[in-house]
Each structure stands twice: as structure tokens, then as C-alpha cells.
Amino acid sequence: MKRLISLTVNGENHEVVVEPRTTLLEVLRDALGLTGAKEGCSLGNCGACTVLLDGKPVLSCLLLAVEAQGKEIVTIEGLAEGGKLHPLQEAFVEHGAVQCGFCIPGMILSAKALLDENPHPTEEEVKEAISGNLCRCTGYSNAVRAILAAKVKEEGER
Amino acid sequence: MEGLGYLLALPRFEYFSPKTVEEACSLLERYGREARLLAGGTDLLVAMKKGKEAPRYLIGIKALSDLDFIEYDGELLRIGALATLQSVADAPIIKEKFGLLATACKKVGTPQVRNMGTLVGNICNAGPSQDTVPSLLVLGARLKVVSSRGERIIPLEDFPRGPFKTALEDGEMVTEVQIPTPPPRSAGCYRWMTKRTEVDETLVGVAVLVVADPTHERCEEARIALCSVAPTPFRARRAEALLRGKGISEGLLEEAGRAAAEETRPRGRAEYRKLLTSILVKKALTEAWENLKGQEVVS
């Protein structure tokens, strides 16, 4: 049975009609046109569908949309402000951390959750934080460097 | 809504979001085996996408916020059915007094999976390789089970009844795990080896808890539990018996490792898993014992 639900995505409220089996990933991509979150494996292994739910990285492919009501959802589209990239996004560009880009939205969101909670992570903590975001292009090194550099950059601009 | 086309979609089901445990139990009772409880979803929804499970009714329990707790009263640690694996791994009291449980929770899945999946869900999934179970077994954990008929306590050891089968009866749900404080002069740890896959599933998992006698010279009691090497996680009691009351030597720990390996019944890669078991048991016992000796020096 379809039902009307209300979701808060990137600070905006959206009313959408879903089935119980509709995942948050499907709503984000199909109903809201937010295609930053990707369907990789669809089984919770690859992390390409990662979004933030109340600040924590979760897998939108394994979350029923009906169960995301009342939560703050943040996708990669919610990071840039007024056309200006988030420091993490800038750092990924500057460090050449992106090749095909498929895993990057999820990886940046995992990194954002880490930096929000732990502003001065060690390299090990960064690796642990993105361990649920599989990348088949880059070997992770530049992504780790970018994340370690992003906080410094953010603070420098303050 | 017409989808863009997905690799894997969920099958259709009817969804309920009960507001109380009583309501959840009565739904479970009404729909019996056609219903499944949905907490974190990281096991159940995957099984449904793969076509291994097709419940007609899903009973989502995320709204039962009373079940989202981790409480310690100085004697008993209680972890509610909605506490996520990450919240258990991060809880200061668990890191301090139940370190082997924190270690095991952190081993499960990825950060995202741990933010969604619950400890109770991990236990109730009842797969042979559930990482949290060996630590809970050596800690002597019990489960609080509720139904419309009342509540009962099941020792965790009696809970798994075969791969993906539990002692739960129709209409029953696990609402919390209860874990007694480890005995004085004890130390434990969880060690494992994994397959090399995208989720690094555990090939052999070993939890031990060692209790020293008052002189710290002998092992008063040792508890050893294993996962991934039999249809369900289990206590290796013959290996435990070898250690009881003995002075610890490298030779004895090696013997205990071999004894534990003999108690396993691995399905695949049997020889390798047995070899790994003997090595990991010895390693975990050595580490726990050294940790205990360290405690002695400190105190």
C-alpha cells in the first residue's frame, strides 16, 4: 500500500509517495533527483549509497524510506553552499582523489561525519572512517591525504 | 513512482511500525512465521534483496525508543534491542569493563553497517559467523525475551539452535542482552581471521576469558568460545577443562589450542579452519593471560 511520507533532505522538507519497500536511495534518486548517492552493490557492502542520517553515515540502499521520516538526511548535494564547494570537496579535487567518481559522494560523506566528530583524526582514523567506501580506481592514498588536508584548510579559512 | 531501474529491489511486503513492545508482540503473534521484526535491516533486507527471505509482513521496531539503551548498574550490563553495534563499541563502560565485546562489535561490517545494525539483531540473525556471539558467550550473557505470554530469560548458550535458527517461539522478541560483570582477576579478548571479501567475513573467531587464582600463579577458570567453525557459535569446553587450576605455560596453551580445534566442526576449508583455531586460541589465551599479569603489577 502506498503512503505519503515527509522527509528532510539537505534541510528541505519533501513530501513523497512511497511503498513500504521503497528504499531511501530510490526516493533520493527517483523522486528528488538527487543522484549523488549511487547504487553500487545494493547489498550494503560498497558504500556508494552512503548518506548522513542525523550526522551518521548509513547505507541508503538498506534503509526503508518510511523509516527515514523525522531524521535529518544529508546527501552530497547538500555540502556545497551558494555554489562554493565544501572544503572536503575542494581537497578531493586538489589532491586528485577522484577518478571515475562513483564512490566519492559516499566517501566524502563518511569523511564529513568523521571530521564533524573528530576534527583532528590520525591517518588510521581516516582509513577506518572510509573503510566502508570501496574504491576501485585510486587505491585510497590521495583520498586519505585529501581528508587529512581538508580540516587544516577549513580552519585556515576561519 | 516508476523506478529508474535498480539492480536489486526489495520484494513487496506489508509494513507496521508498532509504538509499544506489546503491540509488536501481538503483531508477531497474529502473523506468525509470515512476519519478521526489522531493526537495523543490514541482514534482513539483504536476505530479502537476494530472495532468501520473503516475509509478507515486516514489523519495524525503530520507533520503540525505550529499547535504545546501554545501562550498567555496577553488576549487570543491559543492552537494549535498538542499541547499534557502533554505540556498543563506543560506550565507555563497555570499552572499560567488557573490552572483548567492544572489539567484537567493531569487527562487524563497516562503519555504515555498525551505525545501522544492532547487537541484538546480530545475535538474532543466528548465523554461524556472528562475531559478537563468542565474546558474549564467554561473558555469560543472557537474553530477555518478551511475548504476550510474559517474559523469560534465555542463556545465550541455549539460544542458537542451528544455522539461522533460534530458540525464539512464535510471538517472542528479544528486548535486551544482559551481561554480568566479569569476575575479579579476569581478562579477555576476541581475535579472528577473515576471508578476503568486500565484507571480510570471519573465517574463525575466538573469544577467551581467563580468570587467575588469587596468587596470579594459576588459571582458576578459562572460557573459550568460537564462531564460524561449527553450525553455531559454541563454548570449547574440553579445551577449557585442560586449563582449569593449572599453571600457565606455552605448552599448555598450545595443547588447549589443539583441543579447541578438535571440538570444531567446520563445513568448508576444514583443515585450514582447524589450524587457524588452534593458533588463534593459543594467541588469544596468551594475550589475555599477559594482560592479567599486567593487572597484577598495576595493583
Image: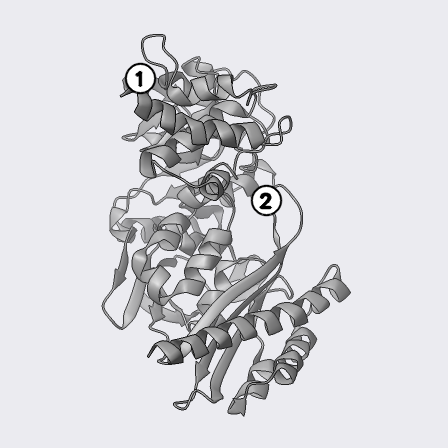
- Position of residue B131 measured from the top left corner of the image (x, y, whole percent): 52, 58
- Position of residue A57 measured from the top left corner of the image (x, y, whole percent): 41, 34
Question: Where does the C terminus of chain A fall, quadrant-wise?
Answer: top left
Query: Which residue lies at the image location 40% right of the left edge and 69% below the top edge?
Result: B141
Q: Is residue A9 visible?
A: no
Query: Which residue lies at the image location 52% right of the left edge and 17% below the top edge?
Result: B3
Q: Is there CB contact under 8 Å for labels 2 and 1?
A: no
Tag 2: amino acid: Val
In the displayed structure, B274 sits above or below A21; it is below
Question: Which of the numbered marks, if any, corresponds to residue A14?
Answer: 1
Position of B27 with respect to B284 (left or right) is left
Tell me the colour scheme of the image.
Answer: one colour
Q: Residues within 10 Å of mark 2 (few under 14, many from 20)?
A: some
Tell which of A68 and A91 is nearer to you: A91
Which residue does the numbered mark 2 point to in the structure image? B199
In the displayed structure, B279 sits above or below B109; it is below
Q: Is residue A81 visible?
A: yes
Q: Are marks 2 and 1 on the same chain?
A: no
Spatial separation of the CA atoms under disc 2 and disc 1: 34 Å
